[in-house]
Image: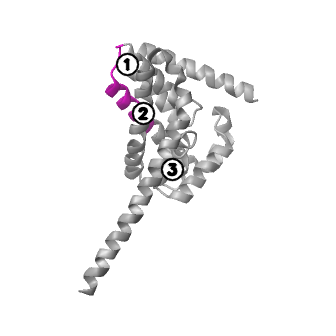
């Protein structure tokens, strides 16, 4: 079963690479749209190869970043709609046919339950959960405007990072998978620093308000 899944993923990846070669920005958009609906397409491969095409001088870094981000938004809205109108029963019944595992859905729901609506932003920066977080957001009918905003804010830096890595690696763009772990570490460290700053900022504001109240 695992070997079959790997073969399907490799086939899908080859298909996306082919459409990027032929369709350019539209191919990047289609690839990231499919990935963001939960299909097992490695987003780092899509954006990394697109970066290599930029290195060849056929596309631009800004163009593929925007195409990838818009693709993430389009795919996420599709997944949101499926979650909103089909619910968990539909996903459990038919998700396996597009290689969306129950364990991945469980992880997405756990993230959403733990972090609330901010999980949409945080998850777009992380592998695996980034492509399934839209389903629980749809199931609970999260405000679609905030959902779209958080999706874009999280997808933009992700797409840019791997697109830039593809440009930097050039002909060796396939080595991008080796950078994924370091990217994840950087994201986690960045989130910890951000949370720490917000906690400190809140404490500072509360302290200032307390001082004013004593005057």
Specify which label sits upstream in the sequence, 1 or 3: 1
Specify which label sits upstream in the sequence, 2 or 1: 1
Could you tell me which residue is drawn at 63 percent across and 44 percent down?
104
Could you tell me which residue is drawn at 40 percent across and 22 percent down?
26
Could you tell me which residue is drawn at 32 percent across and 70 percent down?
205
The vertical placement of 59 against 93, above or below, is: above
Secondary structure found at label 3: helix
User: Badge 1, how many Cα within 10 Å: few under 14, some, many 20+?
Assistant: many
Q: CA distance from mark 3 to mark 2?
A: 27 Å
The vertical placement of 108 against 76, above or below, is: below
Secondary structure found at label 2: helix
Of tags 1 and 3, the one toward the viewer is 1
Q: CA distance from mark 1 to mark 3?
A: 35 Å
**Residue 130: x and y, percent?**
52, 42
User: Badge 3, how many Cα within 10 Å: few under 14, some, many 20+?
Assistant: many
User: For the N terminus, which image quadrant?
Assistant: top right
Q: Report the residue marked by disc 3.
A: 138
Residue 167, picture quadrant: top left
User: Badge 2, how many Cα within 10 Å: few under 14, some, many 20+?
Assistant: some
Q: Report the residue marked by disc 2.
A: 161
> Which dot marks residue 54?
1
**Residue 136: x and y, percent?**
55, 51
Segment colored magenta: 57-74
Front position in the image: 108 or 96: 108
Taking the image as shown, residue 146 lies to the left or right of residue 43, namely left
The majority secondary structure of the magenta stretch comes to: helix
Q: CA distance from mark 2 to mark 1?
A: 14 Å
**Residue 39: x and y, percent?**
58, 33
Of tags 3 and 2, the one toward the viewer is 2
* Residue sitting farthest toward the bottom: 214
Taking the image as shown, residue 214 lies to the left or right of residue 151, namely left
């Amino acid at each position: 079963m695992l070997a079959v899944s790997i073969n399907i993923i490799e086939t899908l990846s080859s298909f996306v690479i082919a459409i990027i070669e032929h369709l350019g920005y539209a191919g990047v958009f289609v690839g990231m749209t499919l990935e963001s609906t939960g299909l097992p397409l490695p987003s780092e491969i899509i954006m990394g190869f697109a970066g290599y095409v930029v290195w060849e001088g056929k596309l631009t870094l800004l163009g593929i970043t925007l195409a990838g981000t818009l693709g993430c938004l389009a795919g996420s809205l599709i997944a949101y709609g499926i979650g909103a109108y089909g619910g968990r029963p539909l996903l459990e019944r038919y998700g396996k046919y597009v290689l969306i595992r129950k364990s991945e859905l469980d992880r997405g729901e756990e993230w959403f339950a733990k972090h609330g609506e901010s999980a949409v932003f945080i998850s777009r920066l992380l592998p695996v959960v980034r492509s399934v977080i839209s389903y629980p957001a749809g199931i609970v009918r999260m405000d679609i405007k905030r959902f779209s905003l958080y999706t874009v804010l999280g997808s933009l830096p992700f797409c840019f990072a791997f697109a830039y890595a593809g440009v930097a690696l050039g002909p060796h763009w396939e080595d991008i998978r080796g950078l994924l772990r370091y990217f994840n570490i950087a994201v986690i460290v960045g989130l910890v620093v951000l949370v720490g700053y917000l906690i400190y900022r809140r404490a500072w504001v509360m302290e200032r308000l307390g001082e004013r109240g004593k005057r």
